[in-house]
Structure formats: structure tokens, C-alpha cells
Amino acid sequence: MKRVSIGLLGLGTVGSGVVKIIQQNGDQIARRVGSELHIKRVLVRSLEKERRVQLPADTLTTDPNLILQDPEIDIVVEVMGGVEPARDYILKALTAGKHVVTANKEVLAKVGDEIFTAAAANRTDVYFEGSVGGGIPLIMPLKEGLTANRLRTVMGIINGTTNYVLTKMTEEKAPFDEVLKQAQELGYAEADPSSDVDGLDAAYKLSILASLAFDARIPLEQVYVEGIRAITPADIESARELGYVIKLLAIGKERDEGIEVRVHPTFIPTHHPLAAVQGVFNAVFVQGDAVGDLMFYGRGAGEMPTGSAVVGDIIDAVRNLQSKVNGRVKMMRQDKPIIPIGQTTSRYYVRMLVVDRPGVLAGIASCFGQNDVSIESVIQKGKGEDPVSLVFVTHEVKHENMARALDQITRLAVVREITNTIRVEGEPRR
């Protein structure tokens, strides 16, 4: 049985998962694939650090060239994270004729074009199932299983930290800061949670998913991003009363005029499949013209789930090596217009604090009307207080019209504060 040598760049959470899976399931994988997977060398920052996995001492190295320049290593697995030096190592591996497996969503979102161009030029392949959704099979279905479809929507919960925080805020009626602290203590959130709670992690992943779903180049800087820091228990309670839950959604839609790509908190109806996704779990909802509605669900991160996706890619690479094929699945990314956020349309939830006096509602409604914002419903909470809460839900409206209306409303003397504005997808059952 032929041995396929692998070089592993990184031995953190995901790298350890890759090693564990190959060690635990190596015999079964070899029988299924017809080749033995051999981890020949692993790049680490320090040789003294205690590891989660056991490897021969001479396997570990701090010199990347022992992997990138080794002619016996056929596949390089990058699980370091970040852009540099990961980008540099990936390009050197591809130039050396090695296939690359990566779980690095940031490097693909920021310099993916450069990486895929280098792979094509050197007749090598890049595999990246682990970059989005942890152990959930997403990339392969979009690249292969759904290619008979014209996909119009890809929408999902693709960050487990934010979903955990919003789930706990909903269950415990607790404020954001308190729940985030719990998440950090449990290891679900980083010491610096900015990438997660500000929506950046989800934006990286949406850039990758949308590029596959719509055969398009999706520049990261054109993905609109909002995080969840402004969500309050009052917003969550309003959502519940109206028949919704709040989720941080990554939304990609292809319309006749172009592609929408946006990440933001969203009201979704309680009957929608994504509404039931709790805790650290992820899910992606896809609509195809032939297949209809699909949802992919599972653990979106972690040592073993993401390790499973990475080892799956290694196996795919081995099978292609055995068949002496490369470039079997083409990355047909085209230049398509990205719709600016101001031109996108949505329904909106708006919560504001106002003075309770006659004529207040009429003045606010006038500002909405002057900017072509149609009101679906309005709820007042409290009476005779200063201030009272007004909650509006609009019909579908252009973002730029909504922004103009809110700018006018903030200048009304009777309006103390606009506490939140959240987009609404879908309608609750009546």
C-alpha cells in the first residue's frame, strides 16, 4: 500500500484534531482510500510546548522549509490561521507542486484570488472544506453536488460564538456583556471577541460561500457587516412578541441587478429552520431552482469537527493524486456587480424612546412617509412615562430610504433615542 506523506503547518486546536483523527482512524482510512496517510513533518512555534497529541520528536520542526521544500511531501495542510505567514507558505507549497488543504477562512477571504491563481498556474489544487462551518459539509456540495442548480440564496448562522450569546440572552433574558463574559469563561469566546461579535468572522465565511454559490468574486471589503453588541433584552422580547427570534445571519442573494452580501443581526420567524439553531451550532440554508430548500446543520468549530473536514479534504486530495488528476473542479469565479448596501431592500424593526404626548406618533410617521417608508405595525410600551418605548415594523424598503428617515427622526425634539434598528427576514405565521 502506497504511503502519502503530509506536512502539517500548525498544531493548535485544528491541527491536533487532524492528528488525532489520522491516528485513531488511519487503518480504516487506508482501507477506504488504498493509501496510508503519513504525517511526516509538523511545523510548530516551539519545540518545548506541551502538546495535546503524541508524535515522534523528530516530526516537529520550527523550520517551514523542511516541509515546503521536501520532495517526499505531497500534501501540505495549513491550519495556522491569519493571513501571514500562512499566505506565504501556501503559495510556496503550490509553487513547489504540492496540493494544499487549508481551514483558514481569513486568508481565503482576503487573498483567495492570488492563491487559486497560483494553484492553476502550478497544476495543483486547494481544498478548503474546513474553512466554513467546521465539520458541516458545505464546500463540496456547493462545488459539486448543487452545480446543476441556479442558486439564489445562501443564508446561515456561521459563527458559533454569536449564536451562543444570542441563545443565552434569549433564554436567560440577560444583557450582552453578562452573557459574553460567561461565553469567555466557558471557552466559547476569545479573550478578544471582536472578530466574532462584530461580525468579521462571519463576513470571511460569507465571502467564501457566496463566491461558490454565485460563481462570483466577492471582495471582502464589499461584504456589509454589523455585529451583535447593540442587541438588548428589550429587542429580544420585542422579537418574541412579534413572532421572531434574533440571529446573526450571513446572507447572500443573487438578484438580476447583482449580488447582495451582508452580515447583521436579523429577525427571523420562529417557524424558520434557522430559528431552531441553538448554542454553538451552525446552519446554512440554501435555495436552488431545481432542488428547492436545503439546510446543512452541525457543529461549526472545534478540534474534531473541523479536523474531520480537513482530513476529508486530505482524502480527496489523495484520491486525485492516485488518479493523476488535478483541477477536476474549476473555480469559475466571474466579475459580477455587488449591490451597495444602500440599494438593498428589507423590512425593518425600529425601537425608539420618545416623549409621551399627543402628535408624537404623527410626527414620526410623517418622517417615514416623506422617505417612502411604509409602516406595517407600531407598538407603544408604557404610558405617561418619560420616555416611552415605540416599536415599529416596516414593509420592505430601500436601506438608503430607511437611513434618511431615521436621520430625520433623530432630530425631532420629542425623540430621546433610536435604540436599535434590525432587519427582518420573512414573516411570522398569523
Image: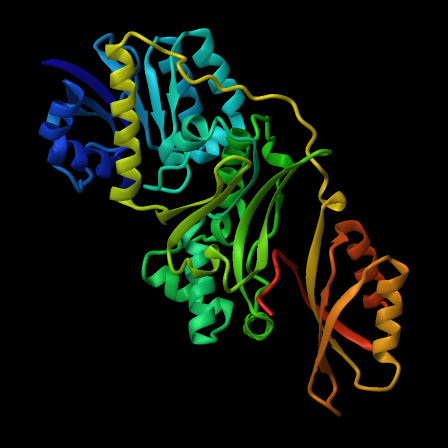
Residue 146 spot, x, y in % from top left: 46, 31
Question: Can you see residue 24?
Answer: yes
Image quarter of residue 217: top right
Farthest-out residue, bottom? 384
Q: Residue at x 76, y 43 (%)?
A: 343
Judge from the rendering whether residue 386 lies leftward or rightward of residue 254; answer left or right: right
Q: Quadrant of the C terminus?
A: bottom right
In this view, 232 is above or below 250: below
**Toward the viewer: 276 or 71?**
276
**Toward the viewer: 405 or 200?**
405
Image quarter of residue 229: bottom right
**Toward the viewer: 216 or 88?**
216
Residue 384 spot, x, y in % from top left: 75, 92
Q: Quadrant of the N terminus?
A: top left
Residue 129 spot, x, y in % from top left: 37, 32
Judge from the rendering whether residue 86 lies leftward or rightward of residue 253; answer left or right: left
In this view, 234 is above or below 134: below
Q: Residue at x 44, y 49 (%)?
A: 159
**Toward the viewer: 4 or 86?**
4
Q: Residue at x 44, y 62 (%)?
A: 165
Residue 13 spot, x, y in % from top left: 28, 42
Judge from the rendering whether residue 163 lies leftward or rightward of residue 427; answer left or right: left
